[in-house]
Amino acid sequence: MIDKARLFKNFDEQRELMEDKIHSGIEANRKGYARLNFVDSDGEPVYGAKVTIKQLTHDFKFGCNIFKYKCFPTDEENALYEEKFAKLFNLAVAPFYWDAFEPEDGKMRFEKDSIFIDRRPAPELILEFCQQKGIEVKGHPLYWPVLLPKWLPDNYEELKPYLTRRLKKIAERYDGVIQSFDCVNEVTSVPLDDYEPHGETHYRSFKPARGDYPEWVFKQADRFFASSKLNVNETRGAWIQFKKELSPYYLLIERLLTKGCRIDQIGLQYHVFARPEHLYDVSIPAYDPLHLYRVMDCYGQFQIPLSISEITIPGYGANGEEIQAEALKNLYRIWFSHKDVEEIVYWNLGDNCAMATGGGWAEDQYLGGLLKSDFSEKLSYQLLDELINREWRTELEKESTESFLYFKGFYGEYELAVSHEGKETTRKIHFSRHGYDEFTIKL
C-alpha cells in the first residue's frame, strides 16, 4: 500500500497556490474570447440570434505512443485498442527506431505489409488509421545511439552516410505528412560505452561523437525536412537534475541554437520509473508543483514550444489505480496550464502495451498503462477522459441582443448552430490562439 499522504505531501502543502496557478493559467493560455457577427443574405446586421456552440476538436495536443497498433493477436483486441486510443488522443507517436525500421541494410519498413515486429507497426499502417480519425502523427526518433541495427558499422564516421540515407528516405516520404519528428533523443543520458551488445540489438554510444553528433544530426535533418517540425527530446533528468540555466539539457539546447540548429520543440520526458521503496524519494521533485513550474519557466525562456513528451506514472500497489489517477489529475492540469506547453504525451496506453520484461529491466513492471491488460479502463483513463472530453471542452447556448455576441472557449474547431426567426444555419469555425477570433455568420 502506497502512503498517499507522504507521496503527495507537496501537492497537498501547495494546494492553494497550485490550484490558483492552474486556474489562472488555463483561463489565460488555453481559452480566449471569440466574437460572432450575424448578418442576413444582404450583409445587414441580424439582431437576437440564438446559437448553440459545440467544440469538436482541441488545438492542444493530447497524445500517446501508438506502438501496439495492430499488434494484438485478435481482431477484438485490436479494435478495443483503436477505440480507446481515438477516444482520448489527437496525437500519436509512431516508432522509427532504427533497428526495427531497417532490420536489413536498405530495406526500410514503410509499407503496411512489412514484416511484423511487435510494438513496431509500419508507419503506413499508423498513418491510415490516424488520417481516418483526425489524429496528428509524430515520428520517434530520427536518431538515437541506442536500438541500432546490427548491420551498421561500429565506427561513427562510417555510420554517417547510412544515417544521411535514412533521413533522406524518411523525409522524401513523410516531410509534412508526419507533422513532427524527435530529431535526437536522450543526448545527455546515453551511456558512454563505445559498444555494448544487448541481445539482438546493439546499444551504442560513440565517444568521439558525444560532443558533435546532435548538431550534425539536426543540420542533416534540416536539409531534408522543410515542413515537419524537428524536436529535441530528453529523459526525466531534465526535471530531476535541474540546475536552471546550468542544467545539462539547457546547455545542450543553448549550444545547438548557437550553432544554428533549427529546434521546433523541446521535449521533457516524465517517466517515473521507481519501485515502491524509492517512490517517495522520487516524489520530492516529481510531485512538487513549484518545481514543475520552475522547470517549464526555465525552458520556456528559449521561446520554443514545450512537449511533456513521454509520461509513465506507476500503477502498482493495492491503491495503485487511485494513486496513479490522482497524480495524473494534478500533473496534467499543471502542464496544461503552462503557457509554453503545446502537447502532453502518455507512454503506453495499456499495461499490455509496455516493453515486456524478458529477464531484465522493462517498462511493464511499473503497471503504468491507462488500461488494464483486458482493456478495461483504469481510474486514470477515466480521469483523462473527464478532463479532455468534458472539463476542457466548450459547449454553450447563447442568445444575442445585439447583432453580435462574444463567447469564451477553449481553442479548437467548433460547430455553430444558429437560428433566427425560423432561419437556421450551421457553420464550422476554427478558433485559434494564434489565428482569427472574429467570425461572420450569414443567415
Image: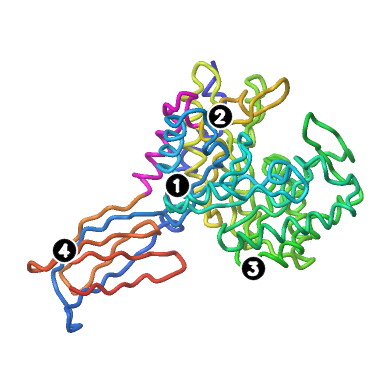
The residue beneath circle 4 is 50
Image quadrant occupied by the C terminus: bottom left
For mark 3, give the secondary structure: loop
Q: Residue at x 54, y 52 (%)?
A: 137
Give the residue type at disc 3: Ala
Mark closer to the observer (2, 4): 2
At which x and y percent is residue 397? 20, 56
The residue beneath circle 1 is 20
At which x and y percent is residue 173? 62, 60
Mark closer to the observer (1, 4): 4
Task: State left or right for residue 360 relative to residue 337.
Answer: right
**How far apart are the alpha carbons under marks 1 and 2?**
29 Å
Q: Residue at x 83, y 41 (%)?
A: 204
Q: Are marks 1 and 4 in contact (CB under 8 Å)?
A: no
> Mark 3 or mark 4, which is nearer the start of the sequence?
4
Task: State left or right for residue 17 relative to residue 268.
Answer: left
The residue beneath circle 3 is 226
Mark closer to the observer (4, 3): 3
**How far apart are the alpha carbons under marks 2 and 3?**
36 Å
> Mark 4 or mark 2, which is nearer the start of the sequence?
4
At which x and y percent is residue 247? 75, 49
> Mark 3 or mark 2, which is nearer the start of the sequence?
3
> Mark 3 or mark 1, which is nearer the start of the sequence?
1
Crowding near the residue tagged with mark 4, few <14, some 14–19, many ≥20 C-alpha atoms within 10 Å: some
Residue 124 has which mark? none
Please check the rendered image and state whether residue 88 is part of the magenta-colored stretch, yes or no: no
Q: Residue at x 72, y 20 (%)?
A: 359
> Residues in magenta?
370-392
Task: State left or right for residue 225 relative to residue 376.
Answer: right
Q: Residue at x 83, y 46 (%)?
A: 152
The residue beneath circle 2 is 368
Give the residue type at disc 1: Asp
